[in-house]
Image (cartoon, helix red, strand yellow):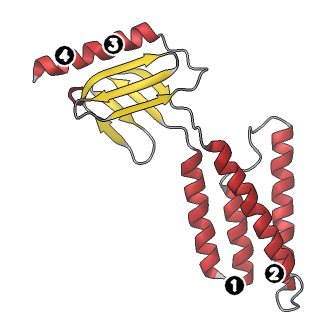
């Protein structure tokens, strides 16, 4: 039975999106430059058209409120498709890896607190037993996981979560106390 679900705020999302925007401008510049070479004109032009269509679709979704941010991880797959048309397979692979990393970087870290312990859901998934903690505390939208081995995880949680701090803290204290009594 799941007791609590806590989502950690992703503080670096804005930086990651700014880097993605820079990479977008870099790709547009490179594909525009490649248009000057007759042999590459068709592939580079096609890549530019695909990028422009993608950006317009994403802008329209954002404007209509269907998504919060302009770009998602598919931006890098659009770049990979452009490089595929030009036959530069190393840049296809690089952009595919960057798309995967961008997807992972934008995820919010989620913890589930239940009777068996604490589970970090995102990659890499990690399961902690209650016996590993000396304290777990939620106060003023900050989650603190204090381990017995002096490791501490502390982060701000998403503010819109409806978690009763007193219930959460007493439940976690009780689970930690039960696990230490059982050992």
3 or 4: tag closer to the N-terminus: 3
1 or 2: tag closer to the N-terminus: 2
Residue linked to disc 4: 178
The image quadrant that residue 89 belongs to is bottom right
4 or 1: tag closer to the N-terminus: 1
Q: Indicate whether 42 appears above or below 52.
A: below
Q: Outermost residue, left direction?
A: 183
Q: Outermost residue, bottom direction?
A: 39
State the SS at label 2.
Answer: helix
Residue linked to disc 2: 43
Q: CA distance from mark 3 to mark 1?
A: 57 Å
Is 37 displayed left or right of 140 in the figure?
A: right
Work out whether residue 88 or residue 15 is closer to the camera in this orientation and state it. 15
Residue linked to disc 3: 171
In x, y percent, where is residue 61?
82, 43
4 or 2: tag closer to the N-terminus: 2
Question: How many residues crowd mark 2 within 10 Å: few (<14), some (14–19), many (20+)?
Answer: some
State the SS at label 4.
Answer: helix
Q: Indicate whether 181 appears above or below 40.
A: above
* Mark 4 vs mark 1: in front: 4
In x, y percent, where is residue 87?
69, 84
The image quadrant that residue 22 belongs to is bottom right
Q: Indicate whether 176 appears above or below 87.
A: above
Residue linked to disc 1: 87
Asked if the residue under mark 2 is in contact with the one under mark 1, i.e. CB atoms within 8 Å, the reply is yes
Q: Outermost residue, front direction?
A: 150
């Amino acid at each position: 039975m799941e007791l609590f679900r806590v989502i950690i705020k992703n503080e670096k999302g804005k930086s990651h999106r700014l880097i993605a925007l820079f990479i977008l401008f870099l790709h547009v510049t490179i594909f525009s430059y490649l248009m000057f070479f007759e042999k590459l004109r068709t592939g580079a032009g096609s890549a530019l058209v695909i990028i422009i269509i993608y950006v317009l679709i994403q802008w329209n979704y954002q404007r209509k409120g269907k998504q919060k941010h302009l770009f998602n991880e598919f931006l890098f797959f659009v770049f990979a498709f452009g490089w595929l048309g030009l036959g530069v397979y190393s840049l296809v692979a690089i952009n595919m890896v960057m798309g995967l990393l961008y997807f992972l970087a934008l995820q919010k870290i989620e913890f589930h607190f239940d009777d068996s312990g604490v589970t970090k859901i995102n990659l890499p998934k990690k399961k902690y037993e209650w016996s590993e903690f000396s304290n777990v505390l939620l106060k003023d939208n900050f989650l603190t996981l204090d381990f017995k081995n002096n490791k501490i995880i502390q982060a701000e949680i998403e503010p819109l979560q409806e978690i009763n701090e007193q219930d959460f803290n007493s439940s976690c204290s009780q689970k930690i106390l039960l696990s230490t009594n059982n050992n």
